[in-house]
Amino acid sequence: MKKSFLIAFLVIITILPGLALGALDEVASRNQFGSEAMRIDFENLTTGTAAAKQLGKWGVEFLEGSHGIPTVSQAYEWGVLTTVIENTPVVGDSADKQMIINFPNPAAKVGFNVYNLGGGGTVVLTAYNAQNELLGTLTKNGMSNSDFIGVEPSIAQGISSLHISYGSVSDPEQIADISIELVQRPQFVSYLAQFADGQISANSALQTTILISNLSDSTATGSLEFVKMYESDPGSGSVPDVVDLDIPPYSAYTFSTPASFTSIVVGYARVSSNVPVEGSGIFRTVDLAGDIISEAGLALAEGAYTYVGGVKQDIARGLKSGIAIVNISGASINASVELYDEDGDLVATNVELLQLEEGWHRAVYLPEMFPQKAGQDFSGTIRIVSNGKVAGVILRSADSGAGDVVVSSLPLGTLEK
């Protein structure tokens, strides 16, 4: 083969568009999805709102752009009103425009019901992998409203982006009741960076309550795990190691530690579920009768590499700020804590405090992080920078006369998703 011909041949191969790695095979019904598949309807979404991030916790992201703005809408078929996501055009009509769905966790199978077709419509599905390489295209003719269509790649690669098109039809694409079988289904995990239970004075004790709400229309199964970093009496059994979760759709589960007057336990909690849940904690001080003296809410965190949050220390009022941090990275980490004043000037850095092994937890007040600020009033921010993911919260406490009592908490903010 001549060299010039070989070069020309290679150029043609390089520029040929649309070469697929395999093909898209049709999934004819939901019965072909595995038991771990997620089925999500849109009935609880608000009509007229953009759908871009509304199912983000499920790992489903509707892409906005010149091709259209996926919007929560409604379809009416045979007397039944169904909530759908519609690819609302930015300008003009929807002819030759596509609805695009991205899956940060690649999907092995995707399927849904189609609407806004009338009778005998054509649906074209095109799938891409995480490298934006074409996995294949499926075209199905003669589809009617509420018909199901599903696809899976013929090769062992997950779908990271799925494009849905009705071709040259001017009406926008509409879909409902999506089923997704992920290549590897993640657990939904969040952390309460600090819990405590036990006696703090002759007449009062700390108690931690965790409220877990199921955000989905599927039963949430999983666990609430208490990781104890200190326990004065490990044999007392006052706080369990693990609590099993089985939370019905749109329901909630509440667990409270016993407010023991015989032992003290401190650590962090981990919530793991098969579906998205939302959690919050409450630090409570109670008296001997169990009546509430004070309480403060705490948000659960999913973890990040960099955090920023406000801190304050008022010596005369006995107000102190501290942080609780958990290493959730799966390996040892090196983290630094930077202290900034209200003018944004860096005033101190601690590069030793948060050298944490896997699963370790640390809770410290401002003077422990920065001894030069002991006995001084201060108002500013801290910045935590880590080479591995951490979960954290800022706690503010006040001197009650019988020990420090948590009076509020502040989230640690991050720019990370």
Image (cartoon, rainbow, N blue to C red):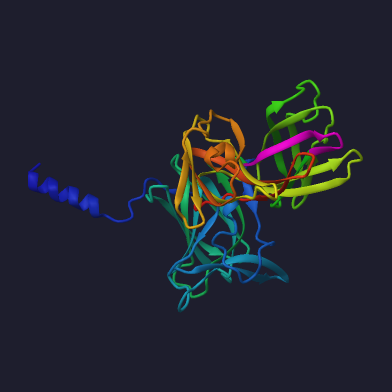
Vertical order, 367 against 135 (above or below):
above
Vertical order, 377 against 330 (above or below):
below
Taking the image as shown, residue 239 lies to the left or right of residue 312, namely right
Q: Give the residue at the far top of this rendering.
A: 235
Q: Give the residue at the far bottom of this rendering.
A: 92
Q: Nearer the viewer, residue 138 or 43?
A: 43
**Magenta-colored span:** 189-206
Taking the image as shown, residue 6 lies to the left or right of residue 138, namely left
Quarter of the image holding residue 97?
bottom left
Q: In the image, what residue occupies the spot 50% across and 65% down? A: 122
On whether residue 332 falls in the magenta region, the answer is: no
Q: Nearer the viewer, residue 380 or 178?
A: 380
Residue 186, percent from left and from top: 58, 41
Residue 150, percent from left and from top: 55, 52
Q: Main secondary structure of the magenta part?
A: strand
Question: Does residue 272 appear in this view?
Answer: no
On whether residue 199 falls in the magenta region, the answer is: yes
Quarter of the image holding residue 67?
bottom left
